[in-house]
Image (cartoon, rainbow, N blue to C red):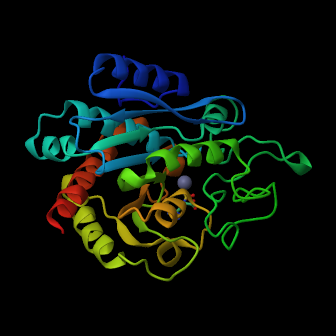
Amino acid sequence: EFGWDDYHTLEEINIWLGAIAEQYHDKVTLLKGGSSYEGRPIVGVHVSFAPGNENRSVFIDANIHACEWISSAVATYILNQVLTSTDTNVREVAESHDWYVFPVLNPDGYVYTHLSDRTWRKTRVPYDDGCYGADPNRNWDNHFNEGGASDDPCSDTYAGPEAFSEPMTKSLSEYLLTIGHSLEGYISFHSYHQALLLPYGYTTDHLDNYDELYDVGLKAIDTLSQRYGTQYEIGNVAELMYIASGGSPDWVKGTFGTRITYTYELRDTGKYGFLLPAELIIPTAEETFDSIIRIFQEFAKKP
Ligand code: 0X9
Ligand code: ZN
């Protein structure tokens, strides 16, 4: 029985996605968003409640960093709520959008965190010096390797030999090119810091729509705090955290101009870090989902 009291293996997650697609066959389509170096599919779903929502699609990106297990747990929780919640506010937001949910963007890395090294971050492409993997959030073709990324294959933030060197980012970007024009929102889940981040990562310069993203973001983190008191920070990546070039949200924003583009750094602030205990999955997912609903409610009011 799939649930949110425990973390799941890649296989369990993919079986659940398949089961959801069967159970809700009129609304949910199983998708392959690309494939990894080791040949694993990047599995996701497309949820559509009504024709006409195509241009108000939301893409959920999670577990691009292998060790950030809470991110895929939150993504599957959100997918489940979008399908099953009976709350009127949730139904309104859920059914007025199409949802693309990809819980595990880095399947090779995720499997490796289960079998060998719980804190592995990168892909599993073999490189020089016996080191493996590029950072899949430094490998996208947007200001590639322009800061906050390393040229050393042994570094955890290795950008890769060139943009889209990793089969995972390359194939997923090709998939995104087929739906990118329809995206109203792109939400990327990471851990950990308790921060809501705005693009870009490569520069401290503010986005064209920085003000509206910041303003709605403040409301979202206020809503998030109301359930359990969890405090979030907000700001652009480069100002609040550090310069980081070649991330997926930067590529999406730069390529499609997607209006609503946030990165979440989920719980916690370091007590458990990546090893967030499983009993904190549900509270983390609940508060995060509250804030997601708030974001889309607020944008629905805007011209
Ligand atoms: O460094 C990263 O890739 C992210 N932080 S993490 O601790 N999860 O590694 C932040 C990435 C934010 N980047 C963009 N949104 N561009
Ligand atoms: Zn991350």
**Residue in view at x 62 percent, y 48 percent:** 169
Q: Position of residue 96 (x, y in %)?
A: 19, 45
Any part of residue 280 in sight: no
- What percent of the width, then of the height, locates residue 179? 44, 46
| Residue in the foreground of this view, choosing between 226 and 137 | 137
Residue 74 sits in quarter: top left
Horizontally, residue 198 falls left or right of residue 53, namely right
In the image, is 50 to the left or to the right of 173?
left
Q: How many marks?
A: 0
| Residue in the foreground of this view, choosing between 39 and 62 | 39
* Residue 196 in which image quadrant: bottom left
Residue farthest to the bottom?
Answer: 205
Among the 4 quarters of the image, the one containing residue 154 = bottom right
Q: Nearer the viewer, residue 52 or 108?
A: 52
Q: Is residue 205 above or below residue 39?
A: below
The image quadrant where one finds the N terminus is: top left
Q: Is residue 106 above or below residue 229?
A: above
Residue at the extreme left: 88
Residue in the picture at 11% in, 39% down: 87
Instruction: Judge from the rendering whether residue 289 lies leftward or rightward of residue 129; answer left or right.
Output: left
Q: Position of residue 54 (x, y in %)?
A: 30, 45
Quadrant (top left, top right, bottom left, bottom right) of the C terminus = bottom left
Q: Position of residue 17 (x, y in %)?
A: 41, 25
Given the current orientation, which residue lies at the most extreme right position? Answer: 129
> Can residue 195 be seen in this snapshot?
yes
Taking the image in four quarters, ligand 2 sits in the one at: bottom right
